[in-house]
């Protein structure tokens, strides 16, 4: 669901009659059909035939009565407040009664109960994903008591009511929007076009979020994190405080562009709110400005080749043990400790993002989506400090060092990844249970989806490994043998069981 105020140009005054005429008309592409009012500030407003011009004018005049009676001066952006509300193409269409319920919930959330308003439904809106069922909420901001309704903080209020409506079982909405969830904006048209040209299912911004998150997991310090990002092939550019180059206050990242193109930079906070530099710095106990400054300034704006570090063979069982320790900490944490559980979800997301850098190509997109879901489940309210480490941060960091290294390829490849995926699936399930206990339905749903993704990944990788082993066995059995093989085998077997010649036995005495 998308609940978003339509653009209001500064300096505009009353255009209520014109807006109602447009909503009642055929639309720019003849997409408006069966136009009707499904709800309003009074119950009988739904009886108005909005397609009749005279009724449109009468309705506009009636909605303007509070302002006209008191000769109220319009606010800077005018009296008319317009909010389109649309569903995802995969969601079921709502009845007029359900749309009326949605409209009243939004009006109440915006604090506009004393305003005169109507909700107009017509046709299916066009979008790149497909046709969307939708309504238009039209509000006159003059209230019955002679004041003007406040629109302050309306975007946050809309985001909150949208989440409530998506979780409302009476509406049966299946698709949960990703727009402005956990600080993420929706895809822009240019991003989608670039992804399609490159043949990728993810946008540059989504790919960068995964790589930045993957670099955080094993990083021991800010300088280490910067080096790991560049090791993943990410272009990194610091943002300095005004007046010098001795204080880094932000950063931006970009993917390596195609030949002849310029890089497209994204600030860390634009990837996700918990990826701002301020939030990331909270992950480490100490902060060495000198060491960090050196890392930021070294080859700034350039990317290194992705590095495949190799660790000792003993590191692999240690990583499994570290994840076990992390899981034990989860089991000992009260389900009501929301802040700690959100930190657990974020750190698990970092491990999944790191695993995506080592997984087979066909599985990387699924793991990227899983990491995104867990990071969204980890999102905290605006007043909370993001990025604070959990009690299990050290254990997870140790595991991430192995997960993101080349060591994983030396210990079974897909089989090893399947084992790690199973452990991460258990962590996701624990995060789901904690959110369910706190009635955080949206976060619980995201964690449940991540759990399912990881279980499915584990099954696919395990099945693939079994198929490869079976094929190798069949190939070995079907391979033609030389006639000499039997003779060599018969000659070889007695040697293993015969006693040494007497000469050798005597020599050994």
Image: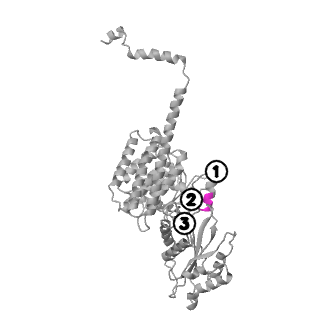
Name the residue that disc number 3 marks.
Answer: 1
Circles 2 and 1: CB atoms closer than 8 Å: no
Identify residue for label 2. 265
Q: Residue at x 49, y 39 (%)?
A: 465
What residue sits 63% from the left and 67% below the top?
124
Q: Is residue 471 above or below residue 489?
A: below
Circle 2 packing at 10 Å, graded few (<14), some (14-19), many (20+), is some
Q: Which residues are magenta?
A: 187-192
Q: Mark 2 or mark 1: which comes first in sequence?
A: 1
Q: CA distance from mark 2 to mark 3?
A: 29 Å
- Most foreground residue, 60 or 411: 60
- Helix, strand or loop status at disc 2: loop
Reading the image, the residue beneath label 1 is 259
Q: Could you say where residue 435 lies in the image, as x and y percent from the top left? A: 40, 61
Q: Quadrant of residue 408?
A: top left
- Mark sitting earlier along the chain (2/3): 3
């Amino acid at each position: 669901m998308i609940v978003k105020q339509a653009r209001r140009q500064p300096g505009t005054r009353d255009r209520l009659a014109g807006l109602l005429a447009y909503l009642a008309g055929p639309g720019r592409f003849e997409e408006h059909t069966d136009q009707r009012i499904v709800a309003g500030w009074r119950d009988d407003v739904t009886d108005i035939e909005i397609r009749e011009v005279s009724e449109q004018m009468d309705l506009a005049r009636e909605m303007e009565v509070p302002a006209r009676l008191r000769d109220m001066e319009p606010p800077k952006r005018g009296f008319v407040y317009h909010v389109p509300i649309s569903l995802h193409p995969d969601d079921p269409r709502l009845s007029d009664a359900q749309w009326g319920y949605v409209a009243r919930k939004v009006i109440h959330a915006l604090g506009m109960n004393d305003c005169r308003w109507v909700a107009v439904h017509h046709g299916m809106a066009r979008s790149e994903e497909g046709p969307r069922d939708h309504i238009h909420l039209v509000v006159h901001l003059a209230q019955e008591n002679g004041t003007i309704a406040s629109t302050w903080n309306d975007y946050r209020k809309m985001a909150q009511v949208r989440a409530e409506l998506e979780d409302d079982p009476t509406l049966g909405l299946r698709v949960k929007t990703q727009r402005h969830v956990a600080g993420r904006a929706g895809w822009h048209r240019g991003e989608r076009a670039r992804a399609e040209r490159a043949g990728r299912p993810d946008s540059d911004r989504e790919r960068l979020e995964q790589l930045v998150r993957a670099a955080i997991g094993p990083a021991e310090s800010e300088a280490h994190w910067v080096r790991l990002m560049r090791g993943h092939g990410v272009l990194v550019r610091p943002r300095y405080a005004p007046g010098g180059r001795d204080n880094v206050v932000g950063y931006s990242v970009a993917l390596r562009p195609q030949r002849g193109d310029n890089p497209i930079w994204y600030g860390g906070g634009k990837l996700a709110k918990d990826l701002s530099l301020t939030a990331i710095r909270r992950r480490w106990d100490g902060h060495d400005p000198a060491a960090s400054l050196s890392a930021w300034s070294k080859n700034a704006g350039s990317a290194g080749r992705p590095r495949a570090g190799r660790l000792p063979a003993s590191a692999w069982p240690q990583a499994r043990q570290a994840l076990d320790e992390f899981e034990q900490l989860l089991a000992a944490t009260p389900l009501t400790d929301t802040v700690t559980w959100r930190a657990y979800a974020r750190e698990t997301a970092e491990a999944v993002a790191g695993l995506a850098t080592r997984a087979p190509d066909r599985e990387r997109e699924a793991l990227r989506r899983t990491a995104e879901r867990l990071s969204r489940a980890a999102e905290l309210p605006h007043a909370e400090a993001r990025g604070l480490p959990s009690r299990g941060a050290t254990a997870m960091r140790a595991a991430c060092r192995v997960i993101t290294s080349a060591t994983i390829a030396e210990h079974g490849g897909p089989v090893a990844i399947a084992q790690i995926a199973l452990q991460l699936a258990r962590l996701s399930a624990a995060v789901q249970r904690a959110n369910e206990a706190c009635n955080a339905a949206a976060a619980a749903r995201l964690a449940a989806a991540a759990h399912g993704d990881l279980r499915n990944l584990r099954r696919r990788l395990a099945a693939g490994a079994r198929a490869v082993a079976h094929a190798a066995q069949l190939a070995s059995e079907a391979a033609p043998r030389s006639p000499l093989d039997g003779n060599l085998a018969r000659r070889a077997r007695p040697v293993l069981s015969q006693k040494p010649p007497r000469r050798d036995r005597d020599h050994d005495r």
